[in-house]
Image (cartoon, coloured by chain):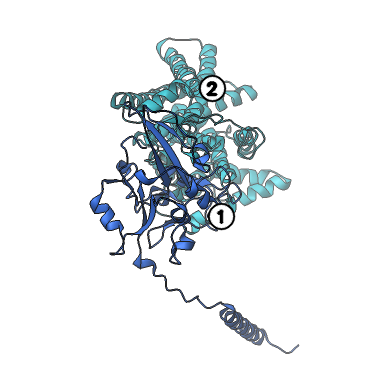
Chain colours: A cyan, B blue
Amino acid sequence: MQGVDGFMYPNEVELQWSLLIVIYPYITGLVAGAFILASLERVFKVEAVRPTYRLALLTALAFLLVAPLPLQLHLGHPERSFEMYLTPHRSSAMAMFGFVYLWYLTVVLLVEIWLEYREDIVRFAQTRTGAARWIYKALTLGSENVSPASRRIDDKVGYVVTVIGIPSAFLLHGYVGFIFGSVKANPWWSTPLMPIVFLFSAMTSGIAAVLVLYLISMKLRKTAVDMRCIDTIGKYLFYTFVIDFSLEMLDLVQRTYEADESFRSLDFMVHTRLWTSQVLIQILLGTMLPLCVLASTQLWTLAEAVRRRLYVIASALTLVGIFAMRWNVVIGGQLFSKSFLGYTTYKVQFAAREGLLPALALLILPFVLFFILVKLLPPWQKPAAEA
Amino acid sequence: MDTTRRELLIQFSKVLVLTGTAARALDKAGEAPEPGDTYQMAAHWWGMIIDIDKCIGCGNCVRACSKENDVPEAYFRTWVERYQVNEDRDHPMVESPNGAIDGFPPTTRSDVKSFFVPKLCNHCADSPCTQVCPVGATFISPDGVVLVDPDYCLGCRYCIQACPYGCRYFHPQKEIADKCTLCYHRITKGLTTACCEACPTGARQLVDLKNPKDPVHEFLRNNKVQVLKPYMATEAKVFYKNLDGSVR
């Protein structure tokens, strides 16, 4: 059979989860990572990252709004997806997605953004004209009280929401890892490390995304970059990436040493079909190289301009590496037969429903939403209290 | 107009109640009476026994299943594999050309042991596919058959990923998960499955584990019986007699 080596069960030849399902954990990972970076400032009082606090929140929201779209596009019957809310099957990891998502979107992210921006929203509602005025009026939700006492309440509530938000962000992405990690039929996925690996890779990619967006935004706005801020973020990116990579290597060493019945099959796959995406792109280009770049910024005192460039390079490579990791998990997990006797091939179509074109659109859409959100809720302005 | 608002509301409520009651009555009247069904789901626990030594790899079962259940081309609710195993038991040569719907070409190899393994959904009592379904569209019926509700399945394909045996597929036209129903439409009428009926050697037999008179009990007592991938702990209900250890 074309594209098949060895023996596959006849129904296995076709891959079930496509490129869109690669994008889904990638996007939710960016959400969780960006939020955790935001919470550094709010909960852990890392003042240095303050300039990216609002940016990180808007990044998380822009990606979170897009997160369910690849799933909807992938479903055979998206019109029935609401059944997950109405009649969820409690033993299903996937059924909980809807609830975790809604919880995260409404209880955590929207509330935190609203509290953070409330003062600005009220000011805009009073100063802007035309349609914008009505939009901001609506966004005030009827509360125009921005007295110091009321802002103190906002701050306290915001703190509580962030504290709740951290485990929620862990839950959001740890749970995505669990969707894969709990499939006992698939040895490539089935490992208790999967949720933890997903979590740390999420943090890594989210931090990298915010760092890149911050540097690009500053460039576009021709504003000076806060070096203390990006040095701190670079440091956190380095630490989380080291943990993420260590966990992945731990998984690899464990599999190699145990060498159970699936090992030969998986080992063969890594050396053939996944060689480029796993070894070259994920491990060398997307992990080792950015780690070396980040390590150089930690080890040596480099000029600001050089550091800025290195951070952009490291972050961009990190984003590529984490995307490759999602690809290798999702697609790699379907390339071998559960009989361990054969391998199939995945070819991405272009303009099909689950092809490259919609995938690219779904990857670009968060940036469009981010742009709109930044226009609507400018993250650059300092709160009135500081202004 | 001398009708007060209060009177108007009362009149409106009356109309609402009356039309509601009438609609319910009409619904009741329109309902077809339940067919006189003598089939008791709780009285059965279906499974299958397969005698490897009896299977000749003719593919009759695959053809019968495909026709009976309108299985889309290139997908299989049941299929047959041919194993050719030499001393290197870890690397058996396995084939199932088009699910063996046309049987197998004769083999010329004499240095191997060769045998056929019919496969189908194992109708696991502890099935991973039903566990993962986000809406419960796939479920185990009270008589032990794993089924999919075609009007409820979202088409997320999580169940296909969760099945260790590769028994499920995504129906290309209906866009839902599809699988062997153990010919539920037949067995609930006292018939056997299409595959068992078509088997010329009796290699596969539908069994009812709850029926004390079913030959399955003697079969399980008197033979060396194995299920596929027992380490998956799915409580599979397709039992193989003389299954070689090389079978995956």
Residue B161 at x, y percent in the picture: 45, 42
Q: Classify mark 1: helix, strand or loop.
A: helix
Q: Is residue B93 above or below residue B211?
A: above
> Is the residue marked by circle 2 packed among few (<14), some (14-19), or many (20+) residues within 10 Å?
some
Residue matched to label 2: A316
Is residue B148 in view?
yes
Q: Nearer the viewer, residue A4 or B94?
A: B94
Q: Position of residue B160 (x, y in %)?
A: 47, 44
Residue furthest left as drawn:
B221
The kind of residue tagged 2 is Ala
Between label 2 and label 1, give the one nearer the viewer: 1
The three-letter code of the residue at mark 1 reads Arg
Q: CA distance from mark 2 to mark 1?
A: 37 Å
The residue located at (24%, 51%) in the rendering is B222
Q: Which mark is residue A80?
A: 1
Tell me the SS state at disc 2. helix
Tell me the tag on residue B146. none
Q: Nearer the viewer, residue B218 or A125?
A: B218
x and y percentages locating residue A222 in the rendered image = 64, 22
Q: Is residue B212 left or right of A184 when viewed as pictured?
A: left
The chain that hosts pointer 2 is A
Mark toward the start of the polypeptide (2 vs 1)? 1
On screen, residue A239 above or below A141: above
